[in-house]
Image (cartoon, rainbow, N blue to C red):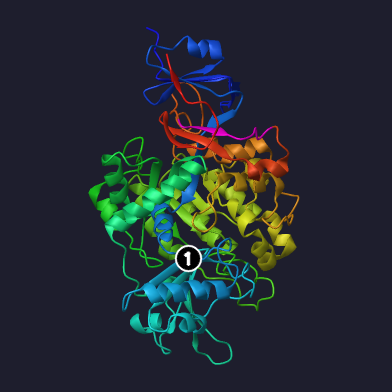
Amino acid sequence: MVEVADLIFINGNVITMDETVPRAEAIAVRDGRVIFTGDSEGALALKGDATEVVDLEGKTTMPGFIESHIHPTLYGLNLLELDCRPANMESITDILEAVSEASEKAEEGEWIQGWGWDDSKLLERRNLTRWDLDKAAPDHPVILKRTCGHMAVVNSKALEVSGITESTESPKGGHLERDKETGKLTGLLQEKAQGMAAVPEYGFDDMVEGMKLAQKDFAKWGITTVHDMSNQKHDLQVYQYMLENNELNVRVRPWMWAIDQNGWTGSLDEVLKVGLRSGFGNDMIRIQGTKFMLDGSVGGRTAAVAEPYEGGDKDSTGILYNTVEEIAPLMKKSLEDGLRVAIHGIGERAIEVAVKSFELANETLDITKMRNRIEHVGLPTDDHLERMKKLELIAASSIGFLYHIGDSYLKNLGPERIKRAYPHKSFKEYGIKAPGNSDLPVTNGNPWTGIYTAVTRKTISGQVLDEVQNISVEDALKAYTNDAAYSSFEEDSIGVLKPDAKADIIVVSGDPFEVDVEELKDIKVEQTFINGKQVFSKSKIPEMTKG
């Protein structure tokens, strides 16, 4: 019996990301899945009386993007806070004015929270301090998170409320920065020290409100699936609540935050106790595994690198959170109970701990088919890549960093190390799957900037970082479609347009294979569909017609 389509796209330039049929003209959809890709005549043969037909008028159409590493609810909550990103606030003066305005509206004792500042892009080219914030809001506790998420600055009131004094010592895996001349706390909290700030938790309703805002941006960027890399109890409840109320418009792939770190509560023991395994869930929400974290960021100079940062002393090599002896047994517990592992490792020292820990687990348990992941994989050595290949580990590469904060990477790493930062050409040569990501809200979540940088190795300022690790447009697109889908065992159902795949479809303003590479970053998403349901539209494509 011939299936009758619910929705048909005709007269398009369809990039299927299916190697067997890479291009098509039309797509037919039924019950949220693709039932046909081919020519318009073949698609229209599946039309019924109630079928909706979209004439693409030659526009380029692709599978929806998969963001392999972001923090959806965190980004949503950030959208409720002061937006200190460089696009909004160019200087410390701008930030202080916004903080001052917020303090005038705040109730007594209310925290003022913000996010997104980047010292490398501020006019003053320095970090904020407690003394800066004291001028703007002396009577309200203030915390502003840096764009990388690995540092925050607080004012004196926040230190007082949090019980942090001049005699307080830095926690293991964190650092309370002190002024080099006076020895006094500057208010900068690095890595695990961020968890010392007594910031009140957001409520459930706040999280739902924020997630609704966040998924609007996902749809605008053409993102139809997101991997939540810091999932905790309330995150999972938010997704389920929104799904139950038909308000969830993006597929979510949660990774459960494993142990207490950076102010976040781990749930490894509880998750293992109830018997949760990777793959549990449905097409909209599906559990992936557990997430661990080993170091910080290059932008904040806290990633655990092998050699000192440019211009730093011999001890300027970042912060390593855990040793192999500490983290390997925890990872093994997760793997033995059927929960895949993703572990954050940017610097060489962190990546070494991650790889060695996976190797130890593999001695007694074959983990090679589990598609475990190292997150970011900022500075792997050839030895790391060889060992990752043997274990069939996935490199969840934050290639988007090089566009948005690549200038600070070059400054902190120098011209030689940058040649192997997020090395997509090397990943391909070693046969390592490397889905791309932005780590939103660390950097902007628009996948086209990551695709552009993977191809050009250029930063937002136009600086060419290197001419060593460039990859093709096709491979860059795979990083946000096929390879990202592979990382969740879904390469046949998402990130591709072929029969039986999910009808996650985007219509874009240009053909990435035809435009000049410099225009890749400027391609816009005009329509986004999830399960054949339109969740975003800004294009001039004619309205759907029936029959």
Query: Which of the pair 270/202 is nearer the observer?
Result: 202
Quadrant where the image shows the N terminus: top left
Quadrant where the image shows the C terminus: top left
Residue 380 visible: no
The spot of residue 17 in percent (x, y) is: 57, 29
Query: Which of the pair 324/349 is nearer the observer?
Result: 349
- Residue 511 part of the magenta-drawn span: yes
- Residue beneath disc 1: 115
- Horizontal side of 370 relative to 24 (left or right) equals left
Task: Find the residue positioned furthest to the bottom.
Answer: 182
Most common secondary structure along the magenta stretch: loop
The spot of residue 299 in percent (x, y) is: 59, 65
- Dot 1 crowding, Cα within 10 Å, few <14, some 14–19, many 20+: many
The spot of residue 332 in percent (x, y) is: 38, 53
Query: Which of the pair 61/500 is nearer the observer?
Result: 61
**Residue occupying image coordinates x 50% and y 84%:** 131
- Horizontal side of 101 relative to 508 (left or right) equals left
Residue 124 found in image quarter: bottom right
Task: Find the residue positioned furthest to the left.
Answer: 274
**Residue occupying image coordinates x 32% and y 58%:** 206
Task: Find the residue positioned furthest to the top.
Answer: 1
- Please report the bounds of the magenta region as a residue range: 504-513
Up/down of 277 relative to 169, above or below: above
Element type at marker 1? Answer: strand
- Horizontal side of 73 relative to 509 (left or right) equals left
Residue 18 found in image quarter: top right
